[in-house]
Image (cartoon, rainbow, N blue to C red):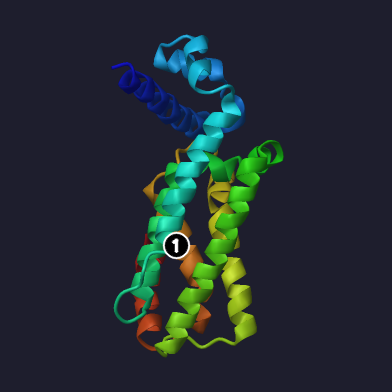
Amino acid sequence: MSATPKRRTRERIVEAGLRLFNDFGEPNVTTGLIASELGISPGNLYYHFRNKEEIVTDLFAEFEKEMAGLLLAPRHGRPGVEEVWQQIHALFELIRRYQFLYRDLNDILSRNRTVELQFKRILQLSVQASMAACNGLIAAGEMQASRLERQALADNLVIVATYWMSYEYVRNPREPLGEAAVQRGAFQVLALAAPHLRGRSRELFEKLAKKYLAE
């Protein structure tokens, strides 16, 4: 009978941690603040998590699982920029939900060895997924790029995606990161590939460009 309340309290701690980390930045949030937000005692929180790093690790494990699900999702039909765009947009939506991980990335990695190793896996998987997307577009006649160009492009796509939220935060630290930031980030990532796109994918990119550059 007692297992359900304990599990629910743990879930509430993780949910509150994510909300507070996103709102105020992970370095500025303490376990005491999380406990206060939930109306529980610090001792109750420590029963589930010994410290804040364990909460961050728990959140990152869930983020990594969702990110892997998106990056490894099977592709259906003819490869094209629509599918790439949808995947990029979904990735940025996920990044926005866990934005503190990216905004406070360097600080977190300097303290949390577990997250450091997990994030390296995400970066590697992201580069592999970017290369697979490029190879699919080339096979479909929708992209033209040498092997070296594809390798550089894959790295650049991941770099921009990784640090876009930090860039948005620096542009306006007092404005919440909303859907507009997601749209801008997804478009900027796709724009890196634009010079290599051909045919139908190039035409679709031009339509996207007119829409987002006009807003």
The image quadrant where one finds the C terminus is bottom left
Horizontal and vertical percent position of residue 58: 50, 36
**On-image quarter of the N terminus:** top left
Q: Is residue 164 left or right of residue 210?
A: right
Disc 1 secondary structure class: helix
Asked if one can make out residue 17 in the rendered structure from this viewpoint, the answer is yes
| 152 up-or-down from 200: above or below | above
Instruction: Judge left or right: residue 128 versus residue 111.
Output: left
Give residue 12's position: percent from left, percent from top.
38, 25
- Identity, as a three-letter code, of the amino acid under mark 1: Leu
Label 1: how many residues lie within 10 Å, few (<14), some (14-19) or many (20+)? some
Residue found at x 58% / y 79%: 150
Quadrant in the rendering for residue 214: bottom left
Between residues 97 and 164, which one lies in front from this camera angle? 97
* Vertical side of 143 occupied by 65: above or below: above
Find disc 1 in the rendering and name its residue.
71
Q: Residue at x 49, y 81 (%)?
A: 135
Q: Residue at x 67, y 38 (%)?
A: 107
Q: Is residue 184 something that shows in the picture?
A: no
Q: Nearer the viewer, residue 207 or 20?
A: 20
Q: Residue furthest front?
A: 1
